[in-house]
Image: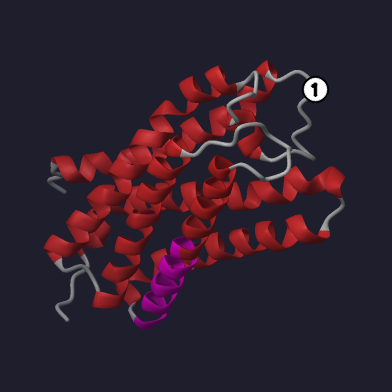
Amino acid sequence: MNRKLINWLGLTGLVALLSNAAAVIFSPLAYPGYNWMAQAVSDLSAQAAPSRALWNRLAAPYNFCGVVCATCAVVFVSEKKVASKLFRTGISLFAVMNWISSVGYAMFPLADGGKEIAAAQEVMHVVVTALVVAFSVASLVCLIVAGRREKTVRGIGIWAAVALLMMLIGSVGTGIVPPDYFGVAERFSVFAAVGFNAVLGWHLFCAFGEGRRET
């Protein structure tokens, strides 16, 4: 396969996953007393968190590469008319989610982790989270349906279903598990989107199997 630059840029999705994982795993080292099983990942990047500087360094590739990967995927599937219109819509919604996440969380970080949401900045952080969840679910549902309809993108549809299941486990789990295990459940949601972005990046690297269908 004669890969073009846009295909090679699909590997940024894998870089984003590794960067995010590194930030989640190693940032607690700079946060004395942090309990990963009970506390949210966002506590590590809160403005008052002692781990914020380390988080920003480790997550810098994630913040950039995630957007690059999803955006390049949109450009590729749109130009090549990969699969159906529904599939391409799902990819586009996923890219929008990545932009909202990258820009929104940078503009409205939590002031302090583990505290009651009260200030305007913290409220906007919650709004950004709601938008990220909404666009994530909408995009994954589109891709699941498209995958059921078309063999050429069935694999992506299966991965989308796995990502959606992880998001549901995270959102439902945080509401039903004891507080001591809140962080465990939340991490399913944290890695759902970035994990699927890595899958998307790999398919971009492989040119989506050159599967195309005009609709």
Please name whichever residue, 163 or 27, is drawn nearer the observer in this view of the structure. 27
Q: Which residue is mark 1?
A: 33
- Magenta highlight on residue 147: yes
Residue 88, image x and y in percent? 27, 68
Amino acid found under the numbered disc labelled 1 = Gly
Quadrant location, the C terminus = bottom left
- Magenta highlight on residue 50: no
Residue 26, image x and y in percent? 62, 23
Question: Image check: 3 left or right of 96?
Answer: left
Residue 163, image x and y in percent? 53, 60
Please name whichever residue, 155 or 165, is drawn nearer the observer in this view of the structure. 165
Q: Residue at x 83, y 56 (%)?
A: 177
User: Alpha-carbon neighbours of circle 1 within 10 Å: few (<14), some, or many (≥20)?
Assistant: few
Q: Residue at x 44, y 47 (%)?
A: 101
| In this view, 180 is above or below 162 | above
Q: Residue at x 66, y 16 (%)?
A: 30
Query: Which region of the structure is painted magenta?
Result: 135-149
| In this view, 140 is above or below 76 | below
Question: Image check: 115 left or right of 82?
Answer: right
Residue 81 occupies which quadrant of the picture?
A: bottom left
